[in-house]
Image (tube, rainbow, N blue to C red):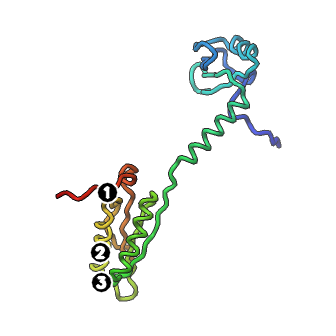
């Protein structure tokens, strides 16, 4: 059982094509015989690296392979850092939630939406409280209405078992960074 990992790219003599398309900064772009491309690479003391093996002919670049791998790793790391990790934050209400609790939870929801997270607000009906489902729906709609400037409703209030859900997601990044517009007179 071999521990050696198969290289991600074919380099130099491992390339199995008769002709390759060379691209890069220090070479004229074009289709070359494999031996000729290898000769160019050796003259520059660099490696011939197969970039796109599925193309016809395969696309190769003359680079320092270690530096090339380092650049690839750096790009992947940068892309991973720039990707937005969106979580779903939950906020729980009761059917008889009073005004102060509602405002407190509203502030938390605002913070979550500004951070770029989705918010799932739900009203949990204990025991016979399910008879107040209209109150729960009004509460969730009021919640959505107060957050409409920074979030958009993805899913309207829906009853599932003893919970009524509402799902909101943040509006575009431009809306989050811009200050609120003054009210029209």
Q: Residue 99's spot in the image, x, y percent? A: 33, 80
- SS under mark 1: loop
Q: Counting residues from the N terminus, which is met first, the one under dot 1 or under dot 2?
A: 2
Furthest-right residue in this view: 1
Q: Counting residues from the N terminus, which is met first, the one under dot 1 or under dot 3?
A: 3
Mark 1 vs 3: CB contact within 8 A:
no
Q: At 52% from the left edge and 48% from the top edge, which residue is drawn?
A: 83
Q: Residue 161's spot in the image, x, y percent? A: 39, 77
Q: Residue 50's spot in the image, x, y percent? A: 66, 25
The residue that disc 1 covers is 180
**Label drawn at residue 112:** none
Pick the front one: 124 or 44: 44
Mark 3 vs 2: CB contact within 8 A:
no
Q: At 38% from the left edge and 73% from the top edge, which residue is drawn?
A: 160
* Residue 97 higher or lower than 72, as above or below: below
The residue that disc 3 covers is 132
The residue that disc 2 covers is 137
């Amino acid at each position: 059982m071999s521990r050696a990992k198969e290289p991600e790219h074919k380099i130099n003599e491992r390339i199995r094509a008769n002709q390759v398309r060379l691209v890069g900064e220090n070479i004229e772009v074009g289709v070359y015989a494999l031996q000729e491309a290898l000769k160019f690479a050796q003259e520059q003391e660099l490696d011939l690296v197969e970039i796109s093996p599925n193309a016809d002919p395969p696309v190769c670049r003359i680079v320092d392979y270690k530096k090339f791998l380092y650049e690839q790793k750096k790009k992947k790391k940068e892309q991973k850092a720039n990707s937005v990790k969106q979580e779903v934050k939950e906020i729980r209400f009761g059917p008889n939630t009073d005004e102060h609790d509602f405002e407190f939870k509203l502030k938390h929801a605002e913070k979550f939406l500004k951070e770029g997270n989705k918010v799932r607000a739900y009203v949990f009906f204990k025991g016979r409280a399910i008879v107040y489902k209209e109150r729960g729906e009004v509460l969730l709609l009021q919640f959505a209405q107060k957050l409409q400037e920074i979030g958009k409703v993805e899913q309207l209030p829906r009853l599932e078992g003893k919970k009524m859900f509402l799902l909101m997601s943040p509006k575009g990044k431009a809306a989050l960074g811009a200050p609120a517009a003054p009210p029209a007179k």
